[in-house]
């Protein structure tokens, strides 16, 4: 799935809250106003990246309108994200991008639940079973010398000793 393009920039204020990050932000044009307030675990993501919050969408026009909201959360470079099928999230390079479109009546405002989560796997966990071990080592050997495979852990276009080094470094204890 291709991620939707960026929308207008938000003014976002971020604060630490017990190891989590709280973001509050707003953006406004002559036709609509969007305010968001959410909490996420981007600073401690491990097997899951999650976000919980609300977006308030306000239609300032005198007719119905579709209001869009898009957000982007960085993913640890050592992890790959796997959104579920029904998730509002897609993956763009090293970011999770979430996107909503909502119809709002003329002059009305609504609160939209923007909570989501994605499962994360270590890049060296090639079979995505939650551990880096001999099974992943076997998959790496199968991909040896090839391009365009997950076994190319550092994504430089070939599976070789460098990827093997990364795999050993990430080997589960
Ligand atoms: Ca594995
Ligand atoms: Ca490589």
Image (cartoon, rainbow, N blue to C red):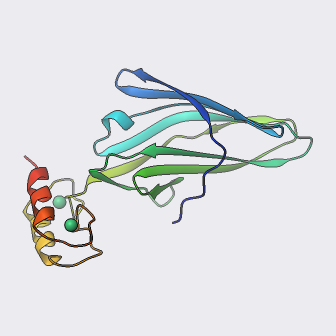
Q: Measured along the vertical axis of the image, is residue 93 above or below residue 29? A: below
Depth check, front residue: 24 or 86:
24
Q: Quadrant of residue 45?
A: top left
Left or right of residue 149, residue 173 in this image: left
**49 relative to 153 in the view: left or right:** right
Residue at the extreme right of the image, as rendered: 62
**62 lies above or below 35:** below
Residue, x 53% and y 65% (percent of image)? Answer: 2
Where residue 3 appears, as percent x and y from the top left, is 54, 59
Q: Position of residue 98 (x, y in %)?
A: 54, 49
- x then y, percent, for residue 72: 51, 45
Ligand 1 in which quarter = bottom left
**How many circles with numbers are drawn on the protein?**
0
Q: Residue at x 32, y 51 (%)?
A: 120
- Residue 168 seen in render: yes
The part of the image, by quadrant, that contains residue 80 is bottom left
Q: Is 80 on the left-hand or right-hand side of 27? A: left
Could you say where residue 141 lies in the image, as x and y percent from the top left?
11, 74
Say if residue 34 shows up in the picture.
no
121 or 150: nearer the viewer: 150
For this orientation, the residue located farthest to the front is: 156
- The residue under the point 48% across, 26% down is 22
Name the residue located 22 percent from the left edge and 62 percent from the top edge: 153
Front residue of this view, candidates 54 and 31: 31
């Amino acid at each position: 799935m291709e991620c939707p393009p960026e929308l207008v920039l938000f003014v976002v204020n971020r604060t630490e809250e017990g190891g989590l990050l709280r973001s509050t932000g707003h953006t406004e044009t002559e036709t609509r106003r969007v305010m968001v307030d959410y909490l996420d675990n981007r600073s401690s993501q491990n097997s899951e990246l999650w976000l919980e919050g609300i977006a308030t969408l306000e239609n300032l026009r005198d007719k119905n309108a579709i209001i869009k909201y898009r957000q982007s959360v960085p993913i640890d470079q050592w992890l790959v994200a796997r959104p579920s099928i029904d998730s509002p999230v897609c993956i763009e390079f090293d970011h999770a991008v979430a996107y909503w479109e909502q119809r709002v009546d003329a002059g009305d405002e609504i609160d939209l639940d923007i909570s989501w989560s994605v499962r994360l796997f270590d890049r060296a966990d090639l079979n995505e079973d939650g551990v880096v071990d001999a099974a992943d080592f076997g998959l790496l050997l199968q991909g040896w010398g090839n391009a365009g495979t997950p076994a190319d852990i550092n994504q430089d276009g070939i599976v070789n000793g460098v990827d093997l080094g990364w795999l050993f470094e990430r080997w589960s204890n």
